[in-house]
Each structure stands twice: as C-alpha cells, then as structure tokens.
Amino acid sequence: MSISKKQISNLLGLIASTENDATDCEGCFSHLAEFAELELAGREIPEAFQAIQRHLEQCPCCKDEFDVLIEGLKALPHENE
C-alpha cells in the first residue's frame, strides 16, 4: 500500500496544526453539554472551556458528538415559544 503525495501533504498539515490537547475524550464529553449551552447562547467561551474547544477542533469523534448535541438542543422548544 502506498500513500500519494497529496495524502502525505494532508497528514503533514494535520500534524503541523495539532496543538497540545490537555483534555482527553472522556474529559471533553463530561463538559460537552455545558460547552454546547454556552455556544448556543452566543456567550464568550471562558478560559476553563478553552481546552474543550481545542479538543473539539482536533478530535472528529467528539466533534461529531458535539454537532449532534447542538442539533438536538436547537430542536428543543424554547421557554419563550
């Protein structure tokens, strides 16, 4: 199996853009609902949640979970409706 030059370039780009992520998937998941509520409210993300935001930028599995959660929260009726 050989890798194309484009695939190598993409991998190198991913490696170069990777930051140190102090939060693992379990830690991210435990704060995902709080992070989603802040995001939906359009509020500034506090420093305590910056690690969650970075993790979501780097982890496609957690990002997928986050996207599903956001869509679910958007579908809920709001109190003022």
Image (cartoon, rainbow, N blue to C red):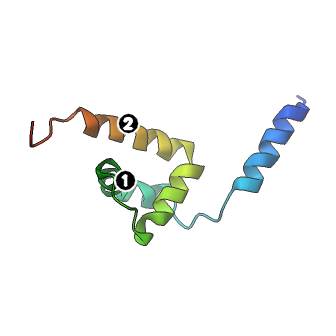
Q: Is 43 situated above or below 6?
A: below
Residue drawn at (33%, 58%) of the image:
43
- Residue 14's disc is none
Q: Determine whether label 2 and label 1 are within 8 Å by CB.
A: no
Q: Quadrant of the N terminus?
A: top right
Q: Which residue is at the front of the view, 70 or 24?
A: 70
Q: Quadrant of the C terminus?
A: top left
Is residue 13 shown left or right of residue 80?
Answer: right
In the rendered image, which quarter is residue 74 located in?
A: top left
Residue drawn at (81%, 47%) of the image:
12
In the rendered image, which quarter is residue 8 located in?
A: top right
Residue behind mark 2: 68
Residue behind mark 1: 32
- Label 2 Cα neighbours within 10 Å, binned few <14 / some 14-19 / many ≥20: few
Horizontal and vertical percent position of residue 66 = 41, 44
Residue drawn at (52%, 42%) of the image:
61
Q: Amino acid at mark 2?
A: Val
Specify which label sits upstream in the sequence, 2 or 1. Answer: 1
- Label 1 Cα neighbours within 10 Å, binned few <14 / some 14-19 / many ≥20: many
Q: Is 11 situated above or below 4?
A: below
SS for callout 1: helix
Q: Is 40 situated above or below 48?
A: above
Q: Amino acid at mark 1?
A: Leu
Please tell me how many numbered marks the rendered image carries.
Answer: 2
Horizontal and vertical percent position of residue 29 = 40, 54
Q: Which residue is at the front of the view, 48 or 62?
A: 48
Horizontal and vertical percent position of residue 49 = 42, 65
Judged from this view, the residue extending furthest toward the left is: 80
SS for callout 2: helix
CA gap, disc 2 and disc 1: 11 Å
